[in-house]
Image (cartoon, grey):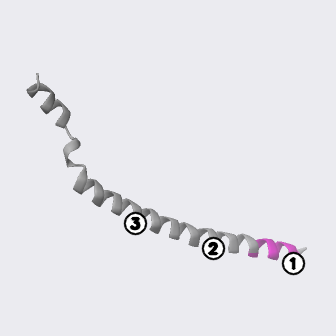
Amino acid sequence: MSWILLLLLILVVFGFGFTMQTLWWVAAVLLVVWIVGFAMRGRGGGGRRGGGRRYSRSHR
């Protein structure tokens, strides 16, 4: 009986370690994607704020 509990404990610890390693890789990938998105938004998305209101009054 104790061998079965030991095996279950080893499987749980191994699964937790594998999950944590995978979550670290997922977090690293998401961080890179966020940084790239932030850099792209900073370069190309500057004209989105209030631009529609400013130009709509001048055309009337």
Residue type at mark 3: give it. Val
- State the SS at label 1: helix
Q: Which mark is residue 17?
A: 2
What amino acid is found at the position of numbered circle 1 in the picture? Trp
Q: Secondary structure at mark 3?
A: helix
* Residue 32 lies in the magenta stretch: no
**Badge 1 local density, few (<14 within 10 Å), some, or many (20+)?**
few
Residue 6: horizontal and vertical position, in percent? Answer: 81, 76
- Position of 1 with respect to 31 (left or right) is right
Q: Amino acid at mark 2?
A: Gly
Residue beneath disc 1? 3
Residue 5, picture quadrant? bottom right
- The reply, left or right, for residue 51 in relation to residue 36 is left
Mark 2 Cα shell of 10 Å, populated few (<14), some (14-19), many (≥20): few
**Position in image of residue 8 (x %, y %):** 80, 71
Relative to residue 16, is residue 38 depicted above or below?
A: above
Report the magenta residues as a range: 2-10
